């Protein structure tokens, strides 16, 4: 084997190794994003229509949220918010529409207190999906019902579902188990 053939073989081997490493890196990235975002990963792929674009979007969300100073709530704040939630939930019996508006406001308030920006709703959803991917779909559904409620298009069963959806996100934001929130 002459020098040129050996050099070509080495270059080809380096290229093949590089391709294998790139493929493995992409698979690991996909696996990590799937694991972190759970059902939100599939939703992003469906919404974007392309796995690579969806993964780029999810990675951008991660990078954005990493810039925030997300913090746990102090125990006293957690208890104060829990008491407010119990009051909001109790109000649902007599004034379901008002309780839904309060629940939406309370979730945004807790998000803000934890360090999430709460401006645009779509951006809020993207941001919250990074740390709370299992309940972000609840937030979307609750918000959809709350907007229908504002237009007078939601019935009591819709409002009940919205309250349940808000509660799931609220509990996750407070880092509480369902049993810890007094009913």
Image (cartoon, grey):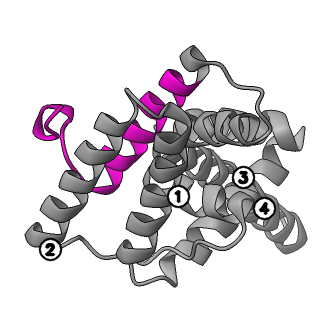
What secondary structure is the magenta-colored segment mainly? Answer: helix
Q: Where does the image place residue 127, in percent across and percent down from the top left?
A: 58, 63
Q: Looking at the image, can residue 137 be seen?
A: yes
Q: Looking at the image, can residue 13 be seen?
A: no
- In the picture of the structure, the residue carrying the numbered disc 1 is 128
In percent of the image, x 60 and y 21: which residue is there? 158
Q: Which residues are magenta?
A: 159-183
Q: Nearer the viewer, mark 3 or mark 4?
A: 3
- In the picture of the structure, the residue carrying the numbered disc 4 is 15
Real-space Cα separation, disc 3 to disc 4, in angstroms: 25 Å
Of the numbered discs in the image, which one, if any, rests on residue 74? 2
Residue 166 is inside the magenta segment = yes
Real-space Cα separation, disc 3 to disc 2, in angstroms: 34 Å
Q: Earlier in the sequence, mark 3 or mark 4?
A: 4
- In the picture of the structure, the residue carrying the numbered disc 3 is 55
Q: Earlier in the sequence, mark 1 or mark 3?
A: 3
Of the numbered discs in the image, which one, if any, rests on residue 166? none
Real-space Cα separation, disc 1 to disc 3, in angstroms: 16 Å
Q: Nearer the viewer, mark 2 or mark 1?
A: 2
Q: Where does the image place residue 9, in percent across and percent down from the top left?
A: 80, 60
Q: Secondary structure at mark 3?
A: helix
Q: Nearer the viewer, residue 15 or 118?
A: 118
Q: Secondary structure at mark 2?
A: loop
- In which quadrant of the rendered image does the N terminus lie? bottom right
Q: Nearer the viewer, residue 35 or 43?
A: 43
Q: Earlier in the sequence, mark 3 or mark 2?
A: 3
* Contact (Cβ within 8 Å) of mark 3 with mark 2: no
């Amino acid at each position: 084997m002459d020098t040129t053939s050996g050099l070509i073989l080495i270059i080809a081997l380096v290229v093949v190794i590089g391709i294998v490493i790139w493929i493995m890196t992409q698979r690991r990235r996909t696996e990590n994003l799937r694991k972190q975002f759970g059902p939100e990963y599939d939703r992003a792929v469906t919404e974007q229509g392309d796995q690579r674009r969806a993964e780029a979007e999810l990675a951008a969300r991660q990078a954005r949220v990493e810039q925030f100073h997300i913090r746990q709530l102090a125990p006293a704040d957690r208890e104060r918010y829990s008491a407010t939630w119990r009051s909001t939930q109790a109000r649902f019996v007599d004034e379901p529409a008002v309780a839904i508006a309060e629940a939406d406001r309370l979730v945004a308030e807790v998000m803000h207190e934890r360090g999430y920006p709460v401006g645009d709703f779509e951006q809020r959803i993207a941001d919250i999906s990074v740390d709370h991917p299992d309940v972000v779909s609840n937030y979307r559904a609750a918000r959809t019902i709350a907007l229908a409620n504002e237009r007078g298009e939601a019935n009591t069963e819709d409002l009940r579902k919205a309250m349940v959806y808000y509660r799931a996100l609220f509990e996750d934001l407070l880092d509480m188990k369902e049993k810890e929130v007094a009913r």
